[in-house]
């Protein structure tokens, strides 16, 4: 890992810095990164400025931004009580204020506060997501808050009680295949009593629990014919051996890991700082592991080599941003931006489909 650092973006509210090769890596790979900051309600878009070898860091406010699903032309984003579709309005080769993608909120679904976590779009172009409040996979509805599609076998009913803390969704060949949960509890808030080692992975098709003993797992993803996930309560990136049902960690990250994406032979992992005195993050093995390594928890992102487990690039957030929820790669995008709702720009910028 390159230990030299560069400051890329500084404001009164937050500072972003990382290893000196991070901008050139983004530019060489022709990718940008998107993340949601959860507690500070931000959609962050991270790109590169090749001319100066600096990072472009652009953010907009979306109340309690969490789940995120990205393509080059479209972003799906969950917020406190809405799910947004943001579409790029720039044609290929066009630039707006120096940015090569301009995402505008075009469609919003009002879901109510059903605690949407991971989002995906299936092979039928249906938006699906985890409603953690209802312990289920659901889709949008034109009439109701959502339409439940599936729940774990141990959850006795669809009810607005976060019982098992279902949170992560992995897609395989365009279909929902695996989910993560913090426990097998069927009572409200029961998952908090099982945070240290009650975490599970469920095969959606069979409803079988295929992995147990995890610590608050998040962000299951199918990549290179493996099921990857984050064992958040221990700060670990790893994969599941589907033959044995064992989780194999490849990297320890200095933070509460949440948000996972892939590009080529790298995993991009999101890190959060544990909440001080919070009953969700406190009392986890992560605290002991950080102490043993004489490390302070970080908020940011790390790019990890899947072959060696080495952390090859890193980005840190300091200031008011202390937690990330989701991380996504946006391919073939150098410097993205988005419009929000707190300036007149969204009212004044008008485009036509001709």
Image: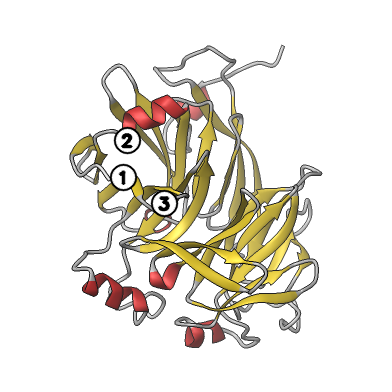
Residue 40 point in image, percent of width and height = 37, 54
To which residue does mark 2 refer?
22
The answer to the question of whether label 3 and label 1 lie on touching residues, with beta carbons closer than 8 A, is: no
Pick whichever of labels 1 and 2 is earlier in the sequence: 2
Q: Is residue 100 visible?
A: yes
Kindly identify the residue that appears in the image at 39 percent across and 39 percent down. Answer: 59
Circle 3 residues within 10 Å: few <14, some 14–19, many ≥20: few
In space, the residues marked 1 and 2 are separated at their CA atoms by 8 Å
Q: CA distance from mark 3 to mark 1?
A: 20 Å
Where does label 1 land, which residue?
315
Give the distance between the C-alpha atoms of the residues marked 2 and 3, in whole angstroms. 19 Å
Up-down relation of residue 128 to residue 315 (above or below): below
Q: Is 291 positioned to the left or the right of 102 in the image?
A: left
Q: Which residue is mark 3?
A: 308
Picture residue at 73% right of the left edge, 57% below the top: 176
Q: Secondary structure at mark 1?
A: strand
Q: Which residue is painted at 18% across and 40% down in the image? A: 4
Q: Residue at x 24, y 46 (%)?
A: 13
Q: Position of residue 251 (x, y in %)?
A: 40, 60
Q: Is residue 320 left or right of residue 186?
A: left
> Is 187 placed above or below 33 here?
below
Asked if residue 197 lies left or right of residue 350, the reply is: left
Q: Is residue 303 shown above or below 164?
A: above
Q: Residue 51 — which label? A: none
Q: Nearer the viewer, residue 7 or 294?
A: 294
Tell which tag, 2 or 3, sits nearer the viewer: 3
Earlier sequence position, callout 3 versus callout 1: 3
Q: Nearer the viewer, mark 3 or mark 1?
A: 3
Q: Name the foreground residue: 330 vs 119.
A: 330
């Amino acid at each position: 890992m390159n230990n030299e650092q560069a400051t890329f973006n500084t404001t009164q509210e937050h500072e972003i810095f990382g290893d000196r090769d991070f901008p050139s890596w983004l530019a060489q790979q022709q990718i940008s990164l998107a993340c949601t900051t959860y507690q500070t309600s931000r959609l962050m878009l991270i790109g590169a400025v090749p001319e100066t070898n600096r990072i472009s860091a652009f953010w907009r406010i979306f109340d309690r931004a969490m789940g995120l699903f990205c393509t080059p032309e479209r972003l799906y984003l969950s917020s406190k009580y809405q799910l947004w579709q943001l579409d790029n309005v720039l044609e290929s080769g066009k630039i707006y204020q120096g940015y090569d993608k301009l995402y505008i909120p075009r469609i919003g679904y009002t879901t109510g506060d059903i605690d949407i976590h991971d989002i995906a779009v299936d092979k039928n172009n249906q938006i699906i997501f985890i409603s953690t409040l209802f312990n289920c996979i659901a889709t949008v509805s034109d009439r109701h808050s959502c339409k439940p599609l599936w729940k774990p076998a141990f959850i006795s009913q669809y009810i607005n009680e976060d019982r098992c803390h279902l949170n992560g969704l992995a897609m395989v060949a365009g279909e929902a295949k695996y989910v993560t949960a913090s426990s097998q509890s069927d009572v409200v808030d029961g998952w908090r009593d099982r945070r240290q080692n009650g975490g599970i992975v469920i095969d959606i098709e069979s409803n079988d629990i295929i992995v147990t003993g995890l610590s608050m797992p998040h962000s299951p993803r199918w990549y290179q014919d493996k099921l990857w996930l984050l064992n958040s309560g221990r700060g670990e990136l790893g994969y599941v051996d589907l033959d044995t049902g064992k989780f194999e960690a490849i990297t320890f990250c200095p933070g509460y890991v949440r948000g996972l994406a892939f590009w080529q032979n790298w995993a991009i992992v999101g890190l959060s700082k544990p909440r001080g005195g919070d009953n969700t993050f406190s009392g986890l093995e992560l605290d002991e592991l950080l102490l043993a390594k004489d490390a302070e928890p970080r908020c940011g992102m790390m790019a990890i080599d899947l072959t060696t487990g080495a952390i090859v690039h890193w980005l840190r957030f300091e200031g008011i941003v202390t937690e990330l929820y989701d991380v996504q790669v946006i391919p073939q995008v150098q410097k993205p931006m988005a419009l929000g709702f707190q300036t007149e720009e969204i009212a004044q910028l008008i485009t036509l489909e001709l």
